[in-house]
Image (tube, rainbow, N blue to C red):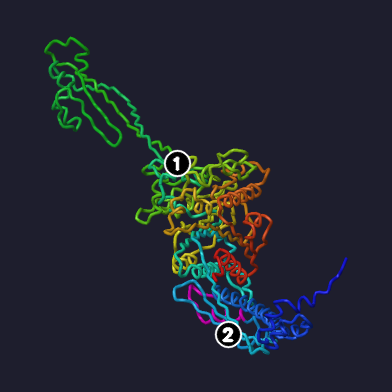
Amino acid sequence: MTIRHTDPQRHDSPAQTCAAAQPPRPVLNRLIGSKRGNVLPILAASILPMAAMIGGAVDMSRAYMVKSRIQHACDAGVLAGRRAMERGSYNDAARAQAQDFFDINFKEGYNRTTNVVFNTSNASGSSTVLGTASTIMPTTIMGMFGKETLTIAVSCEAELNLSNTDVTFVLDVTGSMAWTIPNGSGGTVVRIDALRSSVMSFYDTLASASAGSNARIRYSFVPYSTNVNVGELLYDANTQWLIGANPADTWSYQSRRPIWSITTSDTTTDVSSQSSVDYQTYGTTLNPAKCTNYGNNVNFDQFLWNFRPSPQGTPIVVTSGNVKTTTSYEPYSWNGQTSNWSGTNRRTCVRKRTTVVETTTTTTTTTTVESPVWQSGATFARWEYGRFAFPVHDFVRSIKAANPAVLTPSEVNGSTSRWTGCIEERDTIPGGVIVNTANGITVDGSSNAHDLNIDALPTSDATRWRPYWEETYFFRNNDLSMKNHNLGYTACPSKATLLASMSRTQVQDYVNGLVTVGGTYHDVGLLWGARLASPQGPFQSTVNANPGNAGTVSRHMIFMTDGELTSYFESVASMYGVEQYDLRVTGGSTDPSMYERQRRRYLAICEAIKGKGIRLWVIAFGTTLTTDLQTCASSGSAFTAANSTTLNAAFQNIAKQISELRLTK
């Protein structure tokens, strides 16, 4: 291969000649254009831009960290401020709460920040808290280029929204709720008062959450003990749901009835008669005609016998007391002849006198009989104890003040009574296997336990509810009565209410009127809480009423108890009558026990409630949060409260979870 030198050719080329003819370039341009030894100058010239880029990245990274932190603090502040709003009013306390949460989450001096400012506001009538936050951060390397500080500003919004919400309170108002409990700060408070306060705090939280929105919030209350007071709700819905709707309706109660003593008299009259006959001789010188007149008691006999003259042949009757004497006369003989008198001679005349003495004896016999039916003139004899049917039509009607009270059939003193609204449940099955199924609650595999059917409407006497007649219950023990009306043996709590929008005053008045009485029958309270809240139940028209907006309805039930389940076999009249006599729950069997049957009932009802899409919250107040109570509750919805402060906190916790607190910006 031959290598030839080409420089002469380049020096002599036309291009070289042309370039030589151009004017010379500036030195920097020639330096840039030069391909010989220019790396170092280029590197030196790029140091400053590279320093600016790296320094800017560092400062911007710091600024991003500050902005992220202050945004988080701003969000925390407005969330706290919105949650602290009282009934929709954004007051100084709420602002202070917002500031506290902001300060906790962003400290001045973080990344050398200064001039930290946080402001919040709330437009009147709205449910949103607005916030802005800003700070100044000094730069590091960017200061070399004239940018010594960066201002970082953020904005935030928090809104506590509430969808349409139905809340059913199932509240234990048994006798123990009148006891005291610690208040959490060294003192004590009556349990029912603590409950009243907590319910109002719950109400205020939801009212605050819904301020400025069109969300519908409704409340229903079911106070319970061994019974529930739902009679007037049933009466107003449909009287045919009740035994007592018709004039001929009766219902049997474990009671007593008066036995009346009825005395009757039977008078008999006995007449005894005695007769006597004697013969009287008037004279020996009477002719036949005069002898006949004499025999027939003619006038001349008056003097002899001291009687007024009687018509010829008429007997003389004399009555003295109960003795009647009848005297009659008749001619007997003349001249010894008893017949065929003849002649004109005067002979001996004899007449026959018959005396009849009648004695009348009157005897009155008195007979006394006993009867459960009163009759005129009857007197009270004794009480008879047992299960007796009483007419209940007028008693059921007496629940309305416009209708009169009725005589109490188990009394004889004229006392009256009115139906206060508690009930006896419809027919059930005294079985031991009680479970909730897709087709409802069954007992021993049967769906004919009508009392546990939450949704079915009454169609027969077996499926109708019966009035609880407190004044008539009596308990038998060796033929002696036991009765303790309204002090434990019978108990009727305050009236339940249907779902309704309620003002604060209405809720306050209601909870203030709650009374404490009776024992703890969880199955009773939960059963009727389910009926009042069920979208498919007897009161579904109320439950499913249009909320007036496009929102959905969330349903909640708050079940609060201060004691474990109780069960009374003897001497208590509950919603199931008197178990020792009626045997509706046990059927007379002790396996399983009555307590265990009621326990299974209430747990099955809990499952049925949750199966209807109702969130079931449980609060154990001053008592153990048992495994059963936790099982009853929806997931994450069981609380325990040892004092009034923690009870209020539990209600607040529930209210805040029902409310939807969210950031909107």
How far from the left and from the top, in percent, is residue 571? 58, 51
Q: Nearer the viewer, residue 191 or 546?
A: 546
Q: Nearer the viewer, mark 1 or mark 2?
A: 2
Residue 241: x %, y % from top left: 44, 45
Q: Residue at 49%, 71% (x, y): give it.
A: 127
Give the crowd class for mark 1: few <14, some 14-19, many >=20 residues within 10 Å: some
Taking 365 as reference, is 50 above or below it? below
As measured in the structure, the alpha-carbon distance from the residue carrying label 1 to the one carrying label 2 is 89 Å
Q: Is residue 95 within the magenta segment?
A: yes
Residue 573 makes an appearance in the image:
no
Above or below, 136 against 185 in this view is: below
Q: Label 2's element?
A: strand
Q: Amino acid at mark 1?
A: Pro
Q: Residue furthest right?
A: 1
From the image, tell me which residue sits under label 2. Answer: 117
Please name whichever residue, 225 or 184, is drawn nearer the observer in this view of the structure. Answer: 184
Tell me the number on the disc at residue 149.
none
> Which residue lies under the disc numbered 1?
372
Q: Which residues are magenta?
A: 84-102
Q: Residue at x 63, y 39 (%)?
A: 444
Provide residue 324's location: percent of width, then percent of height.
Answer: 27, 31
Q: Is residue 345 above or below residue 640?
A: above
Residue farthest toward the left in the current orientation of the protein: 344
